[in-house]
Amino acid sequence: MNGRKTPVILWFRRDLRLSDHPALRAACALGGPIIPVFVLDDTFKTLGAAPKWRLGLGLEHFAQVLAKKGSRLILRRGAALDVLRSLIDETGADAIYWSRLYDPGSVARDSAVKAALKQQGIAARSFGGHLLFEPGSVQTQSGTHYKVYTPFWNAVKTCDVEQPLAAPEAVPAPDKWPDSDDLADWQMGAGMDRGAAIMRPHVQLGEAAALARLDYFLSDIVAGYGESRNYPAQDGTSQLSENLALGEISPHRCWHAAARARHEGAQGAQIWQKELVWREFAYHLMHHTPRLLSENWKADWDTFPWNTDKRLAPVKAWQQGRTGMAFVDAAMREMYVTGRMHNRGRMIAASYLTKHLLCHWKIGLDWFADCLIDWDPANNALGWQWSAGTGPDATPYFRVFNPETQRVKFDPERVYVKTWIAEEQADPPQTALDYYRAIPRHWPMHPQDTYPEPIVGAKDGRGAALRAYEDRDF
């Protein structure tokens, strides 16, 4: 400690952790008190029900973690600049630090906040930590950003990644704390209704849980990850997506842990590193081409005759897991019970909506954004545009996943299907029954229903999609 008395405000966002937190370490280095703050501003207005609820859980847990360090998490609601200025007046803080975000709304807000605070004489500094590499630091030889994943991977796979930072031993507290909102008043779970109680046991909450899962993944799973990640009935993935989404674990820690496992001979470790870089690729694309989030990345698709009416019966059947395609329906129900969906299931469910049902990918993007606790703006958008064929480095538009053959290949014993679909099972497991406890009460569904015939068959849907693609100049 250097005797500094003036506090620094540490503005937390999607970085709810203490270790490997550059902004926190820099604030601690100042030697004075730190006031951790979370601001619920307009950027959260459109946050879906499940991710908003999960954020609320994360904030509650992180506040407890800080309390064990002798600190607090101050909660305020309002326009970020107004809230931060008010806190400056209340506390006498002369510096505000935060970790960067990269979606267009956050970039615009943070740029305006930084400019206004600096004009006021406040030391406003932003730090990395949410990505392995800052957008703009990875460029082609011609100085442009990468638009295809494989060259992007080849460009970064041998780059130095900063070593993760240790958590500080203490988070110095001010002599007097500013007032804080009560998290309960924010009603972060209001959109969940009865689904919150069903989903809660499936949440992997906080930094300690994320680090424990990372250790287990590397010790017991990663060696066979190249195969196991494709089988949704297996515990074959890292399951760290929700923690990465809220910054409860850093990508740097994941990268270096995988590098150690790879050095020790775990064959699947590099494949997992490639998945981390796919996340990175999505963020770099979002930074350079923000239209990725809301428009066809390839403008040639703008005139394609998608169905855009989410009220139609086929869309409702897809949302409710009642398409008659078992792999699709199991994946959709898994999401409604756990808040997550296996990646193989995501690909099949997305392909079925956009190709067999010829529905606009934004219908699926919006539904996932409401239902996923691991929702991430860049990854959700890139995943949907990849599946639809509209995005950069997308699956070929004429490739139509067959949900029946995919089920036979990746769920040959129907374990995944039986885990999530109760109909026509004499003694369905609790996971399948939980679906009916979680869904809206007005959905006319019961575990004793007859399982539906396919609304669009695998062969018929593929044929319709290919006919729709004919005469298109993609």
Image: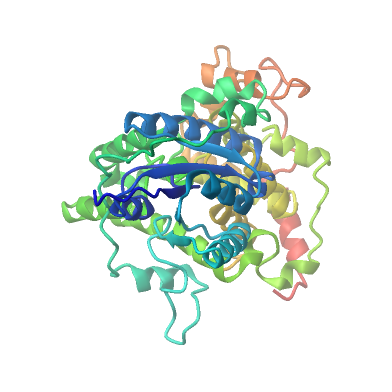
Residue 138 rendering spot, x and y as whole percentages: 42, 74
Depth order, front residue of 185/351: 185
In the picture, measured across the screen, residue 9 lies left or right of residue 426, that is left
Judge by depth and name the residue closer to the eye, 360 or 97: 97
Q: Is residue 429 visible?
A: no
Residue 451: percent from the left, percent from the top?
69, 25
Residue ranking furthest to the bottom: 142
Which quadrant of the figure has residue 318? top right
Instruction: Give the residue displayed 71% in from the left and 72% down from the top.
Output: 299
**What x and y, as percent, mark residue 1?**
24, 48
Please tell me in which quadrant of the rendered image residue 432 appears.
top right
- When the figure is inspected, residue 318 is found, relative to residue 115, above or below; the finding is above
Residue at image coords 44%, 61%:
125
Q: Is any part of residue 366 visible from this angle?
A: yes
Q: Nearer the viewer, residue 181 or 185?
A: 181
Q: Number of callouts in the render?
A: 0
Q: Residue furthest top?
A: 427
Image quadrant occupied by the C terminus: bottom right
Which quadrant of the figure has residue 300? Answer: bottom right
Which residue appears at 69% of the width and 45% of the height?
Answer: 46
In front of the other: 129 or 270: 129
